[in-house]
């Protein structure tokens, strides 16, 4: 999704920039799940709820990570433009898959930009967990669609 009314965060390190960008993707994903929820079939309500809860928890954790380093986290955009219209349950599930792919990509960037070292090791572990969770959610949403393969060999990448 594309941010509307986006303001860039202040200067920082490559790592903090990657974390800030991942946080922005989390904001967009949380917004998008509101759309998914409105158009989903009732049999996927639990999956929608679990997905939103994961992203909200991750959002809060990243905000804490940034603020603990005296970095001002970016704020959510004033609005988001969906990549395509969502008019029915299949569109909603396709949006969920796309958001999880975007989330995996953002966390893969964090993983690639994280330096070695004690703080870096904790950041890498967090990024691996976030990437893995996004990949699992994407697979669960693909299963709802009935598409194959349900998993991706290298989540967050183009390989």
Image (spheres, grey):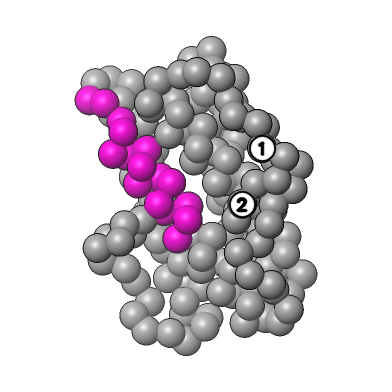
Q: Main secondary structure of the magenta part?
A: helix
Residue 102 versus residue 27 in the image, above or below: below
**In the image, 87: left or right of 148?**
right
Residue count near mark 2 (Cα–Cα under 10 Å), binned few <14, some 14–19, many ≥20: few
Residue at left offset 28%, top offset 39% = 112
Q: Is residue 114 above or below residue 105?
A: above
Residue 54 is situated, as x and y percent measured from the top left of the image, at: 56, 51
Residue 75 visible? The answer is: yes
State which quadrant residue 59 falls in: top right
Which range is magenta? 101-116
**View extreme (top): residue:** 70
Up-down relation of residue 66 to residue 57 (above or below): above
Name the spot of residue 83 as percent of width and height, x first.
60, 64
> Tags 1 and 2 in contact by the CB under 8 Å rule?
no
Q: Is residue 37 above or below residue 88?
A: above
- Tell me what residue is drawn at x 50 percent, y 25 percent: 65
Left or right, 146 with respect to 42, comes to left
Question: Which element is circle 1 on?
Answer: loop
Q: Is residue 107 magenta?
A: yes
The image position of residue 27, as x and y in percent, is: 63, 45
Give the residue drawn at x 38%, y 77%: 150
User: What x and y, as percent, mark residue 42?
Assistant: 72, 79
The answer to which image quadrant residue 120 occupies is top left
Instruction: Report the residue marked by disc 1.
Output: 6
Q: Is residue 94 left or right of residue 31?
A: left
Residue behind mark 2: 2
């Amino acid at each position: 999704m594309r941010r509307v009314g986006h303001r860039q965060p202040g200067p920082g390190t490559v790592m903090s920039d990657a974390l800030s960008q991942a946080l922005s993707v989390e904001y967009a994903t949380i917004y998008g799940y509101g759309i998914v929820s409105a158009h989903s079939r009732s049999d996927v309500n639990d999956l929608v709820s679990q997905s939103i809860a994961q992203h909200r928890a991750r959002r809060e954790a990243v905000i804490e990570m940034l603020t603990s380093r005296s970095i001002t986290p970016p704020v959510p955009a004033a609005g988001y433009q969906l990549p395509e219209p969502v008019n029915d349950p299949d569109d909603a599930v396709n949006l969920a898959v796309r958001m999880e792919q975007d989330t995996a990509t953002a966390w893969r960037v964090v993983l690639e930009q994280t330096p070695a070292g004690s703080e870096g090791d904790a950041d890498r572990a967090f990024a691996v967990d976030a990437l893995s969770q996004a990949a699992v959610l994407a697979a669960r949403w693909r299963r709802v669609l009935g598409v194959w393969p349900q998993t991706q060999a290298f989540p967050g990448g183009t390989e």
